[in-house]
């Protein structure tokens, strides 16, 4: 672990050659990520509408609530989330270890198969082959494709680090490299223990909780933290506030990130000690949150943006805010007395939205807004579209999370009161009917997000056109047009 | 300074988590889902007292069982099925009734001076039997021995077990009155 806060090699020619080697695959990641983001957002709107207007598209078997929700999750998590995570990690690793990508064409093939796997998965869920497990809705025939494609992508991204010229490892690299190894561990174990050779009854729900939360804690979160640790000092021209302690946050996440997922099972028919272990894991992660807060918040507050030509800094600011809100919510909601009210209510989707759409997606979007111009060698087609996307996303996120949280808390109190008491609601149905305004607000939020993501996709497409490249070209030559070294930040 | 603070935070979290786990460990038992569940208390409460008369009444009145022939009044059907109410067989020694229930009864039978010639099916194990457990047989016998004015002693499941073991060699062969009358 190097104590220096950032590698300092900034020779323009090397940046250009690195970016040139990444041009085709990162464009591919960005384009397919944006495409899946749209697919996922459309499916999210459809499932959200169905919660308060069940007759909507009710005659189409492939668009029933269970299928659109599952397919939307697959498209968002594995389509958008992973493509964006791949783009960020390969670019960050290349920048930080000063390595170019060997044989981008092979990576392109792996990306193709990853997207093929996601497409088969999404269509499979709509077809009716999905599983009932959240975050693992993929039909079991899509999983091997994803796993093999991931193996290639992961190895290729790792190569960038392996062949890089700078060996000291910066914290962003810790997080990203670890995530690259954690995900196949999570995914293969979950697939084996749930589908290939299923474990017995209760253990399945424990494995699933471990995977579902592990996907957040050990894949999306480290990528997001890796991004924040890189982009904040770079965009603000400030060092990380207290870099040496950052590594403690990393190790606490590594040790307890997997345990924390078991807290999801509070109130479920699993042994009590399993939940207690999960709650303890969640509490131990407070160290990670505190370390992250000590490092990121003062860094963010102390500097003014110096070279943020695409306005990605505001995305990171929202992500940091969402990160701490989410972290606080995981701690509070894991406690048994709180879980008694909130467990199995709308608070849980609110929490996962806050994480995936608020923390991860905002880091990923900010990262893409930052790196796409550098990869393509041209500025974004429209800054206005970026601003519109940002504000639509923020408003959509706030409305959605707030509506689901408030509605969920109300739902929890009323459902618990069903057994009797002074203000006992008449029936479960009346509890549900009171949720209708909150569910409609969620539809509004999902629609705003959809419009925002549409603007992002359009902007991305126009920028590709402006850069004179179709997204599937594998040309390495013309990357440096219009790209000047002065735009590249000199990072402290 | 920050490191000291982190050390303090980490230590206190370990402390809190240790207390939390001890408090909510549920004895680390795979069977305890609710940590407020107390195994010691639960084990005291576990043996649930079954009222043999109530259980026997339910068995007796199950459609297709005893009630079909002997009727809910225990009077049977004159000329076809013998009454249980006031029957000297029911109120007599438990050795006989248990055997009748386990293996069945065929041939001529006199109850209350009436003569019956039917087939009482076997409720114990064996071909054609209902495979009732010793508990069930004891319950239903206790019920018929204390209902409709009958005043005989209850039948214990242990006694049924004893006779079932003793007569294991008999298989599914029904008893005849002559065989039973040979017993005390």
Image: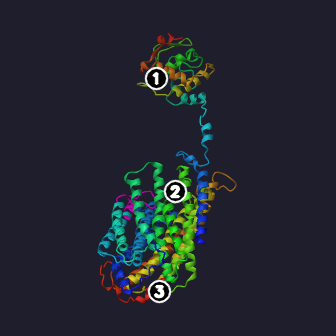
Give the image location of residue A103, x and y in percent. 29, 75
Which chain is mark 3 on? A
* Disc number placed over residue A150 in the picture, else none: none
Q: Which residue in the structure is indicated by mark 2?
A: A262
- Element marked by disc 1: loop
Q: Quadrant of residue A168?
A: bottom left
Instruction: Write down the chain letter for disc 2.
Output: A
| Placement of A88 over or under A286, stated as above or below | below
Q: Quadrant of residue B171?
A: top left
State the SS at label 2: helix
- C-alpha span from label 2 to label 3: 42 Å
Q: Nearer the viewer, residue B151 or B22?
A: B22
Query: Is mark 2 in CB contact (under 8 Å) with mark 3?
Result: no
Task: Kindly tell me whether residue B114 is visible in this rendering.
Answer: yes
Residue A124 among those drawn in magenta: yes
User: On the image, numbered disc 3 is attached to which residue?
Assistant: A309
User: Camera-side residue: A384 or B106?
Assistant: A384
Q: Residue B98, percent across and down?
A: 52, 20
Question: Which disc number belongs to residue B122?
Answer: 1
Q: Residue at x 51, y 61 (%)?
A: A256
Q: In this image, B135 relative to A94: left or right?
A: right
Give the distance between the C-alpha atoms of the residues marked 1 and 2, in whole angstroms. Answer: 53 Å
- Verify whether residue A56 appears in magenta: no
Separation (CA) of disc 3 from disc 1: 92 Å
């Amino acid at each position: 672990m190097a104590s220096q806060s950032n590698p300092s090699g900034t020779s323009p020619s090397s940046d250009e050659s690195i970016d040139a080697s990444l041009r085709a695959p990162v464009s591919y990641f960005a384009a397919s990520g944006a495409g899946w983001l749209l697919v996922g957002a459309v499916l999210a709107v459809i499932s959200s509408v169905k919660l308060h207007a069940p007759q909507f598209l009710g005659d189409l078997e492939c668009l029933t609530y269970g299928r659109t929700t599952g397919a939307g999750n697959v498209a968002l998590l594995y389509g958008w989330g992973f493509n964006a995570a791949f783009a960020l990690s390969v670019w960050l690793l290349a920048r930080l270890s000063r390595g170019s990508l060997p044989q981008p064409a092979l990576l392109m093939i792996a990306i193709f198969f990853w997207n093929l796997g996601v497409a088969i998965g999404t269509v499979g869920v709509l077809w009716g082959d999905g599983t009932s497990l959240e975050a693992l809705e993929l039909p079991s025939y899509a999983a091997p494709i994803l796993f093999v494609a991931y193996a290639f992508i992961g190895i290729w991204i790792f190569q960038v680090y392996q062949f890089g010229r700078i060996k000291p490892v910066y914290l962003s690299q810790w997080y990203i490299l670890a995530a690259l190894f954690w995900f196949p561990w999570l995914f293969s174990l979950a697939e084996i223990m749930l589908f290939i050779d299923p474990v017995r009854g209760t253990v399945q729900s424990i494995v699933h909780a471990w995977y579902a939360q592990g996907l957040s804690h050990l894949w999306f979160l480290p990528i997001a933290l890796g991004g924040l640790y890189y982009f904040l000092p770079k965009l603000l021209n400030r060092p990380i506030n207290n870099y040496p302690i950052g590594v403690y946050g990393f190790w606490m996440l590594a040790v307890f990130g997997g345990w924390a997922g078991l807290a999801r099972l509070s109130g479920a028919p699993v042994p009590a000690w399993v939940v207690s272990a999960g709650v303890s894991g969640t509490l131990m992660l407070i160290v990670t949150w505190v370390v992250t807060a000590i490092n990121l918040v003062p860094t963010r507050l102390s500097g003014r943006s110096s070279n943020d030509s695409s306005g990605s800094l505001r995305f990171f600011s929202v992500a940091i805010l969402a990160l701490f809100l989410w972290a606080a919510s995981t701690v509070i909601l894991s406690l048994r007395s709180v879980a008694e009210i909130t467990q199995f209510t709308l608070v849980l989707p609110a929490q996962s939205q806050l994480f995936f759409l608020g923390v991860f997606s905002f880091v990923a979007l900010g990262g893409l807004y930052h790196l796409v111009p550098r990869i393509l060698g041209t500025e974004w087609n429209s800054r206005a579209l970026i601003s519109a996307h940002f504000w639509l996303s923020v408003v959509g996120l706030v409305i959605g999370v707030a509506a689901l949280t408030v509605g969920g808390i109300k739902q929890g109190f009323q459902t618990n009161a069903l057994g009797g008491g002074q203000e006992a609601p008449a029936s479960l149905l009346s509890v549900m009917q009171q949720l209708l305004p909150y569910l409609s607000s969620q539809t509004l939020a999902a629609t705003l997000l959809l419009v925002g993501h549409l603007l992002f996709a359009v902007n991305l497409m126009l920028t590709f056109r402006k850069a004179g490249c179709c997204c599937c070209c594998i040309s390495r030559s013309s990357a440096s047009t219009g790209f000047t070294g002065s735009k590249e930040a000199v990072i402290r | 300074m920050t490191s000291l603070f982190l050390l303090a935070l980490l230590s206190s979290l370990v402390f809190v988590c240790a207390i939390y786990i001890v408090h909510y460990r549920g004895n680390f038992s795979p069977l305890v889902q609710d940590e407020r569940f107390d195994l010691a208390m639960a084990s005291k409460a576990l043996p649930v007292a079954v009222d043999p008369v109530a259980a026997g009444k339910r068995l007796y009145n199950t459609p297709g069982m005893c009630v079909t022939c002997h009727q809910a009044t225990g009077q049977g059907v004159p000329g076809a099925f013998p009454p249980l109410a006031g029957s000297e067989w029911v109120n007599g020694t438990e050795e006989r009734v248990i055997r009748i229930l386990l293996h069945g009864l065929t041939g001529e039978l006199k109850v209350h001076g009436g003569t019956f010639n039917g087939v009482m099916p076997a409720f114990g194990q064996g071909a054609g039997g209902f495979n009732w457990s010793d508990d069930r047989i004891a319950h239903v016998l206790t019920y018929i021995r204390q209902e409709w004015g009958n005043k005989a002693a209850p039948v214990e499941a242990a006694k049924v077990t004893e006779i079932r073991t003793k007569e294991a060699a008999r298989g599914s062969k029904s008893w005849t009155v002559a065989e039973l009358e040979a017993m005390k």
